[in-house]
Image (cartoon, helix red, strand yellow):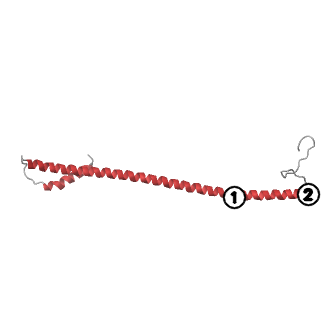
Amino acid sequence: MNPRTLLALLAAFAILAPSVPAAPAAANGAASTRNLILLGGAAAAYLIIRHNHKVHEREAAHAQRQAAREEQNDNAWAAYRQAERAYQQEAAANAELQKEIAYQHSAVESQQKELASLGVRTGTDGTPALVSYGWGNV
């Protein structure tokens, strides 16, 4: 028996003991009934204490599960926010790449116009035509 339970039983006896007169035990049914009431009260107090202990244990376990669930939700939201930031950074990097590609495209177009103004023949894809001397493309 743990110390709390023992203390509860002693408290129940201390509460119920003054209601029992300090008379010598009689061989009649009144003393027996009085003893049964005293023991029944102590047992009821013990059972109530044990029940309350179990209820508090269940409530603590429920609170622990709820806290773990909330922590998982917080972790999920943190992961979502981190993924959203990564997406925004990637979108910004893609925008910079699109600007670079647009600049390179305008540079290529200006070079093609310059080549055309100099009279250099270009292929269908805009590159200068290759000269062949019979041994393949050079």
Residue 47 rendering spot, x and y as whole percentages: 25, 49
Dot 2 or dot 1: first in sequence order is: 1
> Neighbour class for label 1 at 10 Å: few (<14), some, many (≥20)?
few
Total number of numbered discs in the rendering: 2
Residue 95 position by quadrant = bottom right
Q: Which mark is residue 86?
A: none
Q: CA distance from mark 2 to mark 1?
A: 35 Å
Type of amino acid at the residue the image marks with label 1: Ala
Q: Position of residue 14 (x, y in %)?
A: 18, 54
Q: Position of residue 52 (x, y in %)?
A: 29, 52
The structure residue drawn at horizontal position 34% and vertical position 50%, both measured from the top left corner, is 57
Asked if the residues shown at circle 2 and circle 1 are in contact, with their CB atoms under 8 angstroms apart, the answer is no
Q: Is residue 84 left or right of residue 60?
A: right
Residue reaching furthest to the front: 124
Q: Residue at position x 36%, y 53% from top?
A: 59
Quarter that holds the C terminus = top right
Q: Residues within 10 Å of mark 2 (few under 14, many from 20)?
A: few
The disc label shown at residue 118, or none: 2
Helix, strand, or loop for circle 1? helix
Q: Residue visible at 16% across and 51% down?
A: 38
What amino acid does circle 2 point to? Leu
- Using the rendered view, name the quadrant where residue 83 is placed: bottom right
Q: Residue furthest right?
A: 133
Task: Say which element carries label 2.
Answer: helix
**Pointer 1 residue:** 95
Measuring from the top left, give residue 110's x and y in whole percent: 83, 59
Q: Residue at coordinates 62% horizontally, 58% vertically from top-left?
A: 88
Query: Horizontally, is 26 left or right of 75 in the view?
Result: left
Left or right of 6 in this view: 96: right
| 74 to the left or right of 15 | right
Quick check: 96 above or below 51? Answer: below
